[in-house]
Image (spheres, rainbow, N blue to C red):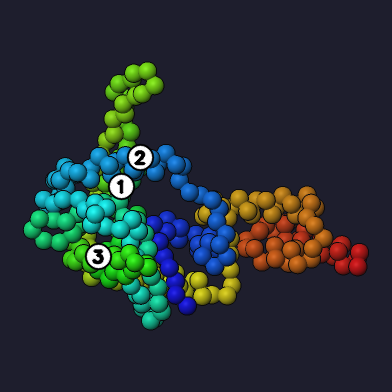
Amino acid sequence: MEYIFSPSEIDYKTKCKRCFYLLKNNKISPGDRPPPVFSSFDVSQKRFFITKNSKDLTDQLPDGEFMDNNNLPGKIVSENLKDNKGRNFKLRGIPDIVIKFKEKGYGIIDFKTTNLSETKSENYKYQLEAYAQIFTHPGSTGKTHTPKLNPVTHMGILQFYPSKMTNHESNEANQKMSMLYSPLKRDEKSIKGFFDQITSLIDLLENKNIPELNEDCKFCNFVKKQIDVDINGEKLSSDLLKLIHLMYSQKISEVTTKKIYELIKKEDEKD
């Protein structure tokens, strides 16, 4: 079986093993996409910087030019890659900014409208490395070929945060954005960490058992609270299989567990 991962989901979507498992294996999503305004910010920022020099982003980058649609396809894809256990997977995504440096190498920069942090790139290390892997081992989709850009020498997150309004006229306003660049070091250790992450994700997806509800996941907790309310209020249907499924949904309270057994007993008495 071949697995396809989006660079953005390798960091963000994998925080909860259960939610990631259900998304990839059962196509069940909590619908937690960012509000459209963040995409609008992203598009606006890219349009502004695409004609400029990499030095305009930050003095931490070498002199270089941004690659545009004439040099890159709208969506990029890797060739078949293998995890640490020899299983096939591909990477497919849409990078924000790709830089061709004048002296040597390429850079991958992702824009984020977020709270500013010097170490922000650590939160997106797998996403950035995924793009580097795509350009190092490019593939194709139909007639569209991803170019090989090697070596990738710089990666990082350019952060934007709205700081203050500077002007207002009629139906328009000017918003000042604070900026901070967070670089990410790329070396053998970080590349190994990426393939370790991919291997653990495929291990997870190949497990026949759905992961338990995660107490640290807001979506799992939302489901758990609904289960507790339904069971303790005796509002569940008479579907015995549903009750049994709930018993294995993970870490419901002892009181709720006893209630499940009572409901099952009632169903048995009816039959």
Viewer-proximal residue, 260 or 205? Answer: 205
Packing grade of label 2 (10 A; few <14, some 14-19, many >=20) is: some
Residue 207 percent coordinates (x, y): 54, 75
Does 104 sit above or below residue 235?
below
Q: Residue at x 34, y 43 (%)?
A: 42
Viewer-proximal residue, 60 or 138? Answer: 138
Which comes before the other along the chain, label 2 or label 1?
A: 2
The answer to whether marks 2 and 1 mark residues whose Cβ atoms lie closer than 8 Å is yes
Residue labelled with disc 3 = 147
Q: CA distance from mark 2 to mark 3?
A: 27 Å
Badge nearest the viewer, 2 or 1: 2
Packing grade of label 3 (10 A; few <14, some 14-19, many >=20) is: some
Residue labelled with disc 1 = 111
Q: Residue at x 79, y 51 (%)?
A: 235
Residue 134 appears in the figure: no
Q: Quadrant of residue 270?
A: bottom right
Does 175 sit above or below residue 266?
above
Instruction: Please state which amino acid type lies under the numbered disc 3.
Output: Pro
Q: CA distance from mark 1 to mark 3?
A: 22 Å
Mark 1 lies on a secondary structure that is strand
Mark 3 lies on a secondary structure that is loop
Residue 170 percent coordinates (x, y): 37, 18
Instruction: Please state which amino acid type lies under the numbered disc 1.
Output: Phe
| 154 lies left or right of 28 | left
Q: Which mark is residue 41?
A: 2
The answer to whether marks 2 and 3 mark residues whose Cβ atoms lie closer than 8 Å is no
Q: CA distance from mark 2 to mark 1?
A: 9 Å
